[in-house]
Image: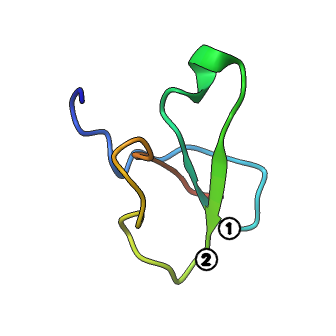
């Protein structure tokens, strides 16, 4: 895996935080995993899910 990009913030049209697969753009689709706002700061998912997009 490349450099750890965990915790990177972005904007998504959701009312909650979501984890997006960093390689989603390569395949022309965005894989979003919603997580509760009071959820953990780290995703309980494998290394593929590193980008955190927080709704602002």
From what the image shows, is residue 22 above or below residue 27?
below
Q: Between residues 44 and 14, which one lies in front from this camera angle?
A: 44
| Residue 29, position as x, y percentages in the image | 72, 27
Q: For residue 5, which numbered disc appears in the image? A: none
Q: Residue at position x 39%, y 46% from top? A: 50
The residue that mark 2 highlights is 36
Q: Residue at position x 38%, y 69% from top? A: 41
Q: Which residue lies furthest to the bottom in this view?
A: 38
From what the image shows, is residue 29 above or below residue 38?
above
| Residue 37, position as x, y percentages in the image | 58, 77
Q: For residue 16, which numbered disc appears in the image? A: 1
* Residue 56 seen anywhere in this rendered image of the structure: no
- How many residues crowd mark 2 within 10 Å: few (<14), some (14–19), many (20+)? few
* Residue 17 seen anywhere in this rendered image of the structure: yes
Calculate the distance from the C-alpha at mark 1 to the C-alpha at mark 2.
6 Å
Task: Tell me the SS state at disc 1.
Answer: loop
Task: Tell me the SS state at disc 2.
Answer: loop
- Quarter of the picture containing the C terminus is bottom right
| Residue 15, position as x, y percentages in the image | 75, 66
Q: Between residues 51 and 21, which one lies in front from this camera angle?
A: 21
- Quarter of the picture containing the N terminus is top left
From what the image shows, is residue 16 above or below residue 47?
below
The earlier-in-sequence mark between 1 and 2 is 1
């Amino acid at each position: 895996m490349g450099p750890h990009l965990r915790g990177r913030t972005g904007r998504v049209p959701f009312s909650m935080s979501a984890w997006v697969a960093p390689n989603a753009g390569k395949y022309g689709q965005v894989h979003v995993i919603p997580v509760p706002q009071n959820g953990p700061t780290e995703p309980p998912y494998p290394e593929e899910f590193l980008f955190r997009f927080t709704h602002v």
